[in-house]
Amino acid sequence: MKTKQIILQARPVGKPTPDDFKIVEIDLPALQSGQLLLKGLYFSVDPYMRGRMNDAKSYTAPFKLNDAINGGVIAEVIESKSEKYSIGEIVVGALPWQVNCVITDDAALQKIDAKYEHPSYYLGALGMPGLTAYFGLLDIGKPKTGETVVVSGAAGAVGILVGQIAKINGCRVIGIAGTDEKAKELVETFGFNEVINYKTTTDLKAAILGTCPKGIDVYFDNVGGEISDAVIANINFNARIVLCGQIALYNNTEVSMGPRLQPILLTRSVLMQGFIVSNYADRFEEGTAKLKLWMDEGKMIYKETIENGFENLPKALIGLFEGKNTGKMIVRI
């Protein structure tokens, strides 16, 4: 059986381009005992993938040149020689960017309800972004009723959820996003109190002060760079900074220079902690159950930006760095 896969054929310099990727056709091996043949349904693209395109040491191994990229995928079992999985079951896991793939039944797969209205949510609100928002805000940010929470990258897959979880916990929530349309939607649909468009704001530090007159108690940082410099300048005593992402810096070809933040952190007794969601792997079941409960109760809603077509995976990934998404960016096959 032949299938298509997308490989990384060149390591990007700066922002990835379509030329860094290539679609190739490969032959799949015949199915052996204990193996599954999967058909991809929904593919996730995420900012962390940019770091894996560099040949550099990080918390996860870099992608290999001329090998299939891999990431979160929801797939259907279309053939099985395993007692663990049956034809027609839907699974989610880290899988290669291939239309079809053969894997062993001991791979880290999770079965999901084939009748669930939004199966792709298991790549978003009920998957890695949702768990990132849940554990990052609640375990590190520790929001308290009446506090002010600022979320950068507020219209992204994680940011939308952070804002809503903060509201559930009785906080005032300020978002930072890149268009007036996103700002309006975050307020009107997702319950943010105010949102700043950083692209049209000439003095971001002053704008943040204006929307946070009592200062900032929790900052959920998805972007880094000059946005975070402006936010941290307005941070309160004993505040908490949740260091989740630095998407503003991922495509830099030189080390960027900015304000030295340590004096602020020191003199205001601020906690800043970085994390990756796998730190909480032993609590994923807890997080997913709570997120699903909030969604079922109508306390939390979600949005996806969906590209159609396997060949559009590179386009969708590049679009993350151009602000093309509101909520989770998904490619549907």
Image (spheres, helix red, strand yellow):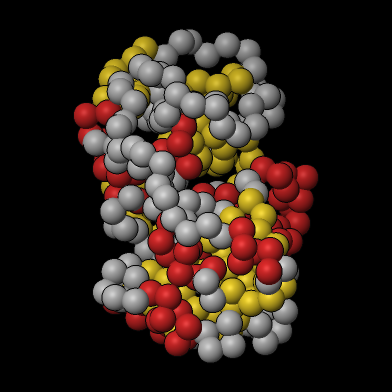
- Nearest the viewer among 57 and 7 is 57
Say whether residue 107 is left or right of residue 248. Answer: right
Image quarter (top left, top right, bottom left or bottom right) of the N terminus: top left
In this picture, residue 117 sits left or right of residue 9: right
Q: Position of residue 13 (x, y in %)?
A: 30, 32
Q: Residue at x 22, y 29 (%)?
A: 19
Q: Is residue 100 above or below residue 212?
A: above
| 142 relative position to 96: left or right | right
Residue drawn 57% across the image and 64% down it? 220
- Residue 80: give x, y in percent of width and height: 57, 24
Determine the image quadrant of residue 25.
Answer: top left
Residue 232, percent from left and from top: 54, 68
Query: Where is the C terminus found, in terms of image quarters?
Result: top left
Q: Is residue 97 above or below residue 229?
A: above
Residue 33 visible (yes or no):
yes
Quadrant assignment, res 21: top left
Where residue 148 appears, as percent x and y from the top left, is 60, 81
Q: Seen in the image, is 239 located left or right of residue 70?
A: right
Seen at 41% across and 61% down, the residue is 226
Q: Nearer the viewer, residue 159 or 219?
A: 219
Give the answer, above or below, for where 47 lies relative to 149: above
